[in-house]
Image: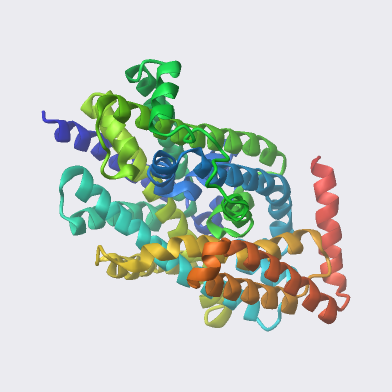
Amino acid sequence: MSDHGFQLLAIGIYMIAMLVIGWYAYKKTSNLSDYMLGGRGLGPAVTALSAGAADMSGWLLMGLPGAIYASGLVEAWIAIGLTAGAYLNWLFVAPRLRVYTQVTKDSITIPSYLDNRLRDTTKLLRIASGIIILVFFTFYVSSGMVSGGKFFESSFGYDYHTGLLVVSAVVVAYTLFGGFLAVSYTDFLQGLIMVIALIAVPAFGIFLTGGIGETLDSIKAVNPEHLSLLPAAATAAGIISSVAWGLGYFGQPHIIVRFMAISSVKETKSARRIGIGWMIFSLGGALLTALVGVAYFQQQGLTLKDKETVFIVLGQIIFHPFIAGIILAAILAAVMSTISSQLIVTSSALIEDIYKALFKKDATDKHYVLAGRIAVLAVAIFAAVIAWNPDSSILDLVGFAWAGFGAAFGPVILLSLYWRKLTNIGALAGMVSGAVVAFVWGKSEYLSGMLYEIVPGFIICLLVAIVVSIATYKLNPEIEAEFAETERLMKAEK
């Protein structure tokens, strides 16, 4: 069998495993809560790894190693910011959101939680947040499909559209039928594949470069400042912008929805330890892969044309083609886990927050589950149409989407959990302000070059939400009672 044959065999086994998990989850899905939130029964390991896998995408295995390979450890500030942000998210948002979403009429999406928590009789908050999720995640899903198409094109020489259709078909199949459970279980497996691959490549690669001492010497030969977190060219604004990526975690719907699905508050502590451990090993592996790559290609006197392929190239050099196929499957896993998570959250927003709010309020769970599956298919088809052009500029929206969600939802989620005086008008004004500032700032070449747009967007959203809430606050006994009940349950769980 040829090298490509072994690699395709490994990827074929991986694809079949995803479909089997989807079928298993389908058999366990009987109502809307199961389909959208897994019946709130996820264990800590599945919750932690599925959140991590949904978060990282192909950036972890290609973007980050490529950036460090090119520019050195100064690019690691993004990883430091993300790890800190993820830890704070698990610590302050996860346990309280798990309790509060159940207290507020058993809310199963972020928009429905905000609607119920703030007693928004106008439904504007729910619909606006649902539309934000629908729009941005449709483009986010599309960018993932582009990545899948380019993955098969660059790895095996297949036609771009063939790769796009294969990846889309498998992801849509297990998401459409298995819902949130399928997404979470497949993300768990994908998270394991990713972290094992990210540990294995640099661990074995360091033998090729002659050990730690030889590796460090080779890196210094390329650039003495490559191993510095604070090289001469680094700026304070640049480092702040990199670390500020961590702010985005508080407002990412496809990540924080995992907190709502965990089986109990007590499990969030175990999940936090597992999740942060996974992040440290994964990000550390990506970092070391880049550094080993710098040393290896320096020693060989070679130049790596596409720096973002350092993980793929090293995996193919180090391992048997079948194992290299598993390495390639890790990249595919990163792409597919994010697509599936975004699909299910987009479906939830479309059905739970727009369709139910505006049109069909009293249908059966069976009807809503079917509608949810139709929504997954519709969003996927629309995203695939956008992705059909391999030169689509939608990939530029990925960085904006992270900042947009972080700026629009992050402060509102934090205030809703910890400040009883947040109002529906304050939340809506803050959400819109944060999104607009992030958009305008991000689209300005001058402003975005100064500071990452999530920083001003997050600050404006926070200030506007607080000021408008103070101006519009009226005592609501039901809101007060739910806030007090959440406090009581949090204390009882400790």
Residue occupying the point 41% across, 50% down:
26
| Residue 452 x/y as whole percent | 56, 61
| Residue 226 x/y as whole percent | 47, 35
> Which residue is more in the foreground, 84 or 328?
84
Residue occupying the point 18% across, 31% down:
6
Residue 155 higher or lower than 364, as above or below:
above
Residue 18 showing in the rendered view: no
Colour mapping used in the image: rainbow
Quadrant containing the C terminus is top right
Quadrant containing the N terminus is top left
Q: What number of labels is visible?
A: 0
Q: Is residue 159 left or right of residue 418?
A: left
Residue 395 higher or lower than 338, as above or below:
below
| Residue 56 x/y as whole percent | 47, 47
Residue 12 higher or lower than 455, as above or below:
above
Residue occupying the point 46% across, 54% down:
341
> Which residue is more in the foreground, 144 or 65?
65
Q: Is residue 446 left or right of residue 330?
A: right
